[in-house]
Image (spheres, coloured by chain):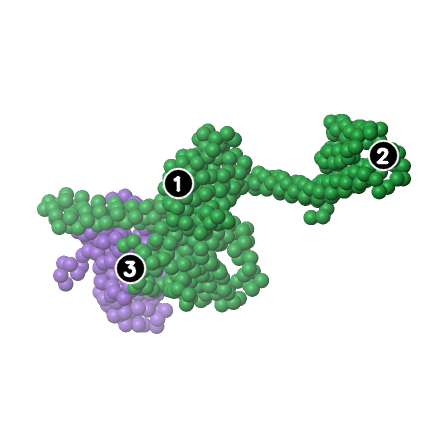
Chain colours: A green, B purple
Amino acid sequence: MNTVPAGHMAASRAEVTPSVWLLRLGAVMLALIIFLIDWLSSLDVAIAVLYVAVILMSGDLFSRRGVAVVATACGTLTLAAYLFSHGTEWLVPPFARCMVSLCAIAITAFLALKNKAARDALQGQVHLLHRSEAFLAGAQRLSQTGSIGLKMPSAEMYWSDEARRIFQFDDRSQPTLEYMIGRTHPEDTDDLKSLVEQAYARHANMETEFRLVMSDGSCKFMRMLAQQVHDASGECEYIGALMDVTAAKNAEDALHRSQSHLAHVTRVTTLGEMAASIAHEVNQPLSAVTTNAEAGLRWLNRDVPNLEEVRSAIERIKSEAHRASEVIRRIRALSRKTDPTHLPIDLQDVLQESIALVRREILRHRVNLDFRPTDAPMGVKGDKVQLQQVIINLLMNAMQAMSGMHGKERVLSVSLSYTPSGDVLLRVEDNGPGVAVQNLPSLFNPFFTTRPEGMGMGLSICRSIIDAHGGRIWAESELGHGAVLSFSLPAAEQVPL
Amino acid sequence: MTVADISPVVFVVDDDPAIRTGLDSLLRSVGMRVHTYASGGEFLLHPFEDVPACLILDVRLQGESGLDFQVRLAEMKVSMPVVFVSGHGDIAMSVKAMKAGALDFLVKPFREQDLLDAVTLALQEDGKRRETGKAAANLRARYQTLTSREQEVMAYAVTGLMNKQIAAEMGLSEITVKIHRGHAMKKMHARTFADLVKMSQALEGG
């Protein structure tokens, strides 16, 4: 606090303009004229009282020390004029007049100095205020955060420059709530309106996110926080901070897009690894279809057609065609490139569908699958395709882990349960060679692989998918005793039937 | 013996029930007797009939593969013709199967006529094999009825020795040799001496 007035004085000294110099000269001239009249005129009045005007003038022209110097000079001039005109006589009326003048000069000087001190302090405050305003404006501009004040119930609004800039309001117009809602994205107006209703209902704190549609059609993402404050008169006002989070949002979206793209690529890669099995899965029903069709025709073309045989052949054709299309449907669902949607689903369904997809691989790897479905549905909220991808990845990894194993039964155990904290837990356990302890932490890192043909993306994608679902994925293993990979997801109440 | 019991039979081993039923219906539609099994093990549990038979075997079976099963059958001296069917034609796989004595290797989905042709051929082969097998067994049975002297005489005779020479070799009279020789011809059902020579060759070959 102390340094600021000094700083301010330094600033005012630096700011001395020619007009101030002129005024200072005028004050000096005035003082000289008063001195000459006081000394030379024979008027029986206290001319020296007029020095008061010089001191008052100097209040605006000099610093406090300057004012003190001027006051001292005026007093000295008064005494000098008296000595020049009246000599050392005292106890005469002119002396009394001189004393009155000196008192007037002293009192005025005192008041002028006090006034000057108060003005200096005020100016310091104003300066401080300007500076913090500049700080705030700079910070707002840099962080793209604007401030909005809303007085209730008059709905009178105050906007900071940055807030205006964000909303692209010009400086002249006075933005209103309607104006603000008008700029909002049509899908978000209801949210904002309900927020305004909350303000009318005097909710203490409010937070929301909404989009703006600018005049050029571009979209901005806003985050707004508002807090209720009461002023001295008891009026309620909301002070809100409004942040333009478009860049962050865009970066986040881009990240999500590239993550889902990567997930898709690895999904397709997994399907590629399963290609032989998938071809077999489709070929098998197709082969049954042609065989049954041929059999049906032959039964029909006999001298006495056997319609019962024909009928059952056609029925088998129908069911086998369904079987083939079901395989294709599953693969298409898995290979489709869609944005993840988080919906309530039964994890057991997802698991069974995944097992159906890798059924052939399980046979091919000569693995015994140990899985007992539970009676109750295991509801979670998530993206079916992505969760399927995670499960298939875990199953394939487990099978590949056991593929080098001979002379021992290969067992793949899959189980679904609830954790003590109520999360849904899926465990995939193999009895393969296991993972070395030093490799466990890096298992989920991108490009970490123990297979020569592995890309090392599978488990890393699994982790980002499970993370995005608010879940956890981890591995446990003892070298030589297989590995357990598990993930848990928060349970969801409703599962559509 | 009823007619059904002597008509040929086709065995199908495939782990896919839909393929099994399809093949069953197809083969029955052309009047064949069919038995289907999900695995090689299940097939072996079933007693074999003494009729011409063939086996349609899927290469990719759950558990023991078709190729492994083919090897096991050979080890068990089950010489039934095998027609392989496979989900995908792998040259190495088919070569292996054919080398191990498979009659044909069809890739799914195959032309049904091809399969029927292969099965028909297989049954014919098996029929022939059984005929020759049976004839050889008969021959051996007849040979067993010969006394050791008769067998000895027969062995000398088929090398082209005269009765007199055989008698000298064996230290018998020519008459005795003649009698043994006549018994041997009769017991072996040989109408001419040339028949006896052929039978002897067949016995040595078998």
Other-residue count near label 3 (Cα within 10 Å), few / some / many at <14 / 14–19 / ≥20: some
The residue under the point 33% across, 46% down is A328
Left/right of residue B167 with respect to residue A43 in the rendered view: left
- Count of all numbered marks drawn on residues in the image: 3
Q: Is residue A222 visible?
A: yes
Q: Are marks 1 and 2 on the same chain?
A: yes
Other-residue count near label 1 (Cα within 10 Å), few / some / many at <14 / 14–19 / ≥20: some
Q: Quadrant of residue A298?
A: top left
Q: Amino acid at mark 2?
A: Ala
Find disc 2 in the rendering and name its residue: A81
Find disc 1 in the rendering and name its residue: A188
The residue under the point 36% across, 44% down is A332
Secondary structure under tag 1 reads: loop
Find disc 3 in the rendering and name its residue: B38
Secondary structure under tag 3 reads: loop
Please name which of the two marks, 1 or 2, marks the residue nearer to the observer: 2
First in sequence, mark 1 or 2: give its number.
2
Q: Farthest residue to the left: give it.
A: A304
